[in-house]
Image (tube, rainbow, N blue to C red):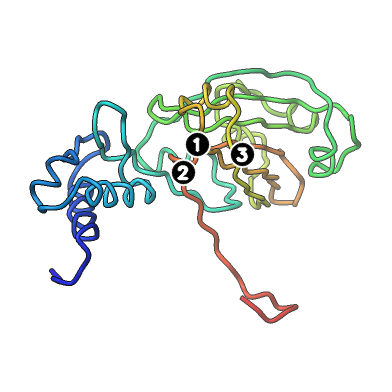
Amino acid sequence: MDSQQPKYLEIASHLRSLVSDGEPGDLLPSDAELCDRFNVSRMTARQAVHLLVNEHLVERRRGRGTFVAPRRVPRSLGSPLSFTESMRQRGLTASSRSIESGAASANRSEARALGIGDGDPVYMIQRVRLADRVPMAIERVVLPPSIASSINTDLESGSLHHAFEAAGFRPSRAHADVSARLATEWEAEQLDMPPVSVVLSEERTIFDQESRPLEHTVTLYSADRYSFSAVLLPDTDRGVV
């Protein structure tokens, strides 16, 4: 151990080892215990803990202590991989809680994405997606009527991607934009998050093997339960990466 290393970094390194060896929900040493172990002030101990809070490795629970945070689910930006399949690959069981479904009118963004007219009829599904019964995201899916009518399955609770493939539409490409914002009170309640929380909003259009738009989706992810990654390719027009 580098003797010149600031004490709070030494404590943070110790806590990271405990997190690595532990499981989500495990109780970590209290501030007082860290003070005694490393002979530091409470302010220094808290500085180390807050460092790991900002890295989403631990979470503080008022009056209860510091705990190993739930593991974040990685997601590739613009991936056409379904929620159900993504959770299955991570050993989690996907399920849904229906909020609303049925005929609707396409708004401007949905119409542009699906190549239809503003206000044209679409089939809409809004639901909460869960992994091992933990709410992960709120999803609003809009399907062109021609696609929805071709699917013979429960559109509210089943995997749409499995339904697409069964009907001969293979999800092959996706385009997505992601932004972050504060969750509304209703969104925080649906996702079982604290009142002041951040959601990641992904607006995505999925295309089939013939480049036909299959669905336009706006998904609100709990920022504490997801991390996004992207593959960057050279920009041939500008010669930059």
Residue at image coords 68%, 75%: 235
Mark 2 lies on a secondary structure that is strand
Which residue has dot 3 on it? Answer: 165
Which residue has dot 1 on it? Answer: 222
Which is closer to the viewer, label 1 or label 3? 1
Q: Is residue 129 above or below residue 200?
A: above
Q: Residue furthest bottom?
A: 239
Residue at image coords 21%, 45%: 42
Tell me, yes or no, whether the two marked residues, 3 and 2, touch with CB atoms within 8 Å: no
Q: Check disc 1 and give the amino acid type.
A: Ser
Q: Is residue 60 above or below residue 10?
A: above
231 left or right, relative to 7 = right
Mark 1 lies on a secondary structure that is strand
Which residue has dot 2 on it? Answer: 226
Image quarter of the N terminus: bottom left
Image position, residue 79 (x, y; %): 57, 51
Dot 3 or dot 2: first in sequence order is 3
Q: Check disc 2 and give the amino acid type.
A: Tyr
Dot 1 or dot 3: first in sequence order is 3
Mark 3 lies on a secondary structure that is helix
209 left or right, relative to 198 = right
Other residues around mark 3 within 10 Å, as few (<14) / some (14–19) / many (≥20): few
Distance between the Cα atoms at labels 1 and 3? 28 Å
Tell me, yes or no, whether the two marked residues, 2 and 1, touch with CB atoms within 8 Å: yes
Q: Check disc 3 and give the amino acid type.
A: Glu
Other residues around mark 2 within 10 Å, as few (<14) / some (14–19) / many (≥20): some
